[in-house]
Image: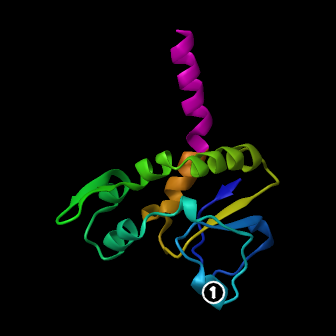
Amino acid sequence: MIKDDKPLLKRFPAEESDGKRVIIAIGIGLAKMHHMQFHEWRPELAPTRILKNDFLSRKITFIQYQNGYEKPGYGKVTGFNELIDSRQKAQRLLKTRKKEYANSPTKHLTLLCYCLDKHICHRSLIKKKILEIDEKEEEAIKSVIL
């Protein structure tokens, strides 16, 4: 089971049901400073600083965060979905996590970052990408066969 419902804050302490706790944020300074429990830090599953900062400062919408946007004086900013798709290390990690956790009733993986609302957070996007892995591979195989 893959969980994405907890932000990485002191008021949401680790629970046994969390299983493996993985931070998918750019940095882990606050987590270390507050002695928060986690097993891994995976910055390759985090957004870029510019993407994160523009979203948190409300300069862009969640749709732009996902799909990319033009930034005056900067040019095109790659959206989160394309960013993760382009990172080979992230793709390998997503496939590994899918095999290990997605269909397991007993093994749990909890994705953590500092955002409060999972619905407008990359935790939900990473979870969705993990769960969609087999579907994309099956479609690719079918298109080759047909």
Query: Which residue position is annotated with label 1?
Result: 10
Q: Is residue 119 visible?
A: yes
Kind of residue sitting beneath label 1: Lys
Establish if 126 lies above or below 8: above
Highlighted range, magenta:
131-146
Q: Outermost residue toward the bottom?
A: 33
Residue 108's x, y, as percent? Answer: 75, 58
Task: Answer whether residue 90 is magenta in the image.
Answer: no
Q: Which residue is drawn at 56% across and 71% down?
A: 113
Q: Is residue 22 left or right of residue 69?
A: right
Q: In this view, does 124 lie to the left or right of 103?
A: left
Q: Residue at x 80, y 71 (%)?
A: 16
Examine the rendering and report whether any part of residue 9 can be seen. Answer: no
Asked whether 73 or 107 is in front, the reply is 73
Residue found at the far left of this picture = 72
Whether residue 30 is situated above or below residue 2 in the rendered picture: below
Left or right: 68 as drawn, with respect to 5: left
Majority secondary structure of magenta residues: helix
Q: Is residue 132 magenta?
A: yes
Q: Where is residue 104 in the image (x, y as percent from the top left)?
A: 78, 47
Secondary structure at badge 1 equals loop
